[in-house]
């Protein structure tokens, strides 16, 4: 969880969209949280462009649901959202 953008892109460069990936057990709570955030509409969009996390909505959701998260889980969630929004942007750029 301290990889640079260049390191991430280097590792992802050889993957195809339908490739499976392995998730370390300690990262599963972050993956599950990201899926929940995505499904609950807690990402910010302008039109069809994903800007990343809606931090206020996520904070409200955590407060109202009385859910506790560790700081490293939040850092992982931010990373996943950044990679997700960058990937969507790159896919759109290729289509134009």
Image (cartoon, helix red, strand yellow):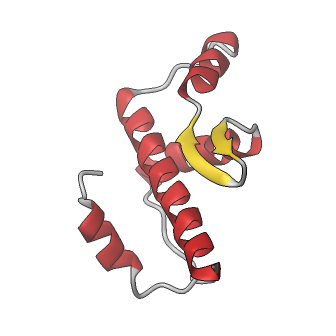
Is 65 drawn above or below residue 20 in the view shown? above
Out of 85 and 75, give the one closest to the viewer. 85
Out of 13 and 51, give the one closest to the viewer. 51
Screen quadrant of the C terminus = bottom right
Q: Residue at x 55, y 64 (%)?
A: 89
Out of 24 and 1, give the one closest to the viewer. 1
Q: Position of residue 84 (x, y in %)?
A: 54, 58
Q: Residue at x 63, y 53 (%)?
A: 49
Which residue, as the protein is rendered here, is positioned at the far front? 96
Q: Is residue 7 left or right of residue 77?
A: left
Quarter-of-image position of residue 43? top right
Q: Residue at x 59, y 45 (%)?
A: 34
Quarter-of-image position of residue 63? top right
Q: Residue at x 66, y 20 (%)?
A: 61
Out of 74 and 28, give the one closest to the viewer. 74
Q: Is residue 86 left or right of residue 17?
A: left
Q: Position of residue 19 (x, y in %)?
A: 57, 83
Q: In the rendered picture of this protein, how many numbered marks are placed on residues?
A: 0
Q: Position of residue 13 (x, y in %)?
A: 39, 83
Q: Position of residue 16 (x, y in %)?
A: 54, 86
Is 19 drawn above or below residue 27 in the view shown? below
């Amino acid at each position: 969880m301290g990889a640079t953008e260049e390191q991430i892109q280097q590792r992802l460069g050889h993957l195809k969209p339908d490739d499976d990936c392995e998730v370390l057990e300690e990262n599963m709570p972050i993956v599950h949280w990201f899926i929940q955030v995505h499904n609950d509409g807690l990402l910010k969009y302008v039109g069809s462009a994903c800007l990343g996390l809606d931090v206020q909505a996520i904070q409200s959701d955590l407060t109202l649901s009385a859910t506790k998260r560790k700081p490293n889980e939040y850092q992982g969630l931010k990373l996943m959202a950044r990679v997700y929004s960058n990937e969507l942007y790159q896919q759109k750029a290729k289509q134009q």
